[in-house]
Image (cartoon, rainbow, N blue to C red):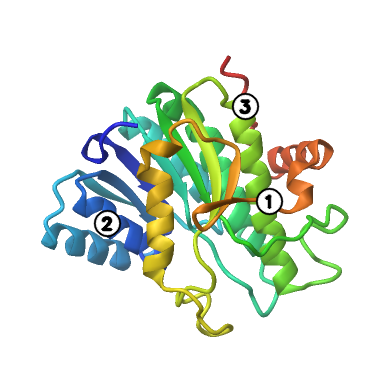
Amino acid sequence: MKAVPEQTILITGATDGLGRAVARELAAQGASLILHGRSAAKGADLLAELRAAGATGRLSYELADFSSLEDIGKLAERILTTHDRLDVLVNNAGIGVELARQESQDGLELTFQVDYLAAYILSCRLAPLLVASAPARIINVSSAGQAPINFRDVMLERNWDGVQAYCQAKLAQISLTFDLAERLAGTGVTANALHPASYMPTKMVVNLFTPQSTVADGMRNTLRMITDPKLDDVTGVYFNRSTRARAGAQAYDDASRARLRELSESLTGVAFPASFG
């Protein structure tokens, strides 16, 4: 990878919690950042904070609500038309365990759309730009909380459970990571998934769980995935913090991953990238 000041990095969910902490550190190191969030006010505040702290790289803020497939697609299109390179895509945006079932603007179960389908769309749409910018990296911020996808009721319309919704979306994200690593092999683009830390005191945790880690813990593990030269050739790996780990079994099942790709294409209208070989 290039030196951090020479990189352009997209971080989704950058206005709070882990995303904001990672943005602060990368800005301090001189990276050019494309920062995403769904609040214009929070975005303006973040940019002001980073500039006041002495950021030297280019900074931009992109507004998109991931409860809208159209918004996600427009975000990808804006990046493709306004940026000639992208060195790292950090799919960090997400919601936690919801207490009641909610639907997106598209009528889909909200957790599955925000935590998984957004990463699917951005990864697929931005893959050509990442390949053109190689060496490059895709980092999917996932979780140790994983559960097999219930393909008979993916949207959990018949049997809602907030933990299942969250955990199956995170396993879907890891499955996507493994598919991307295979499809992008030989292009110079790596794809890895990461459980950054357990129960950091972020807004998705504090109301339901007792924090066990700090945001700084998660930031360090995420930053390593973005910048560590030792990971230049590492791809298709799930990391639990800084250690290679075994993800849920379904993520390694070819038939399940193919079924998920077909479902994702059907729901989003976005095709999985063709071979770059």
Tell me which residue sits at (15%, 57%) in the image.
51
User: Where is residue 60 drawn, in percent x and y?
Assistant: 26, 48
1 or 3: tag closer to the N-terminus: 3
Q: Are marks 1 and 3 in contact (CB under 8 Å)?
A: no
3 or 2: tag closer to the N-terminus: 2
Q: Nearer the viewer, residue 191 or 110?
A: 191
Determine which of the numbered discs, if any, sits on residue 170 in the image: none
Residue 174 appearing in the image: yes
Q: CA distance from mark 2 to mark 1?
A: 29 Å
Residue type at the position of mark 3: Arg
Q: Residue 99, relative to residue 81: is it above or below?
A: below
Determine which of the numbered discs, if any, sits on residue 183 in the image: 3
Determine which of the numbered discs, if any, sits on residue 25 in the image: 2
Residue underneath mark 1:
246
Question: Along the horizontal axis of the image, is 208 left or right of 211?
Answer: right
At mark 1, the secondary structure is: loop
Residue 229 figure quarter: top left
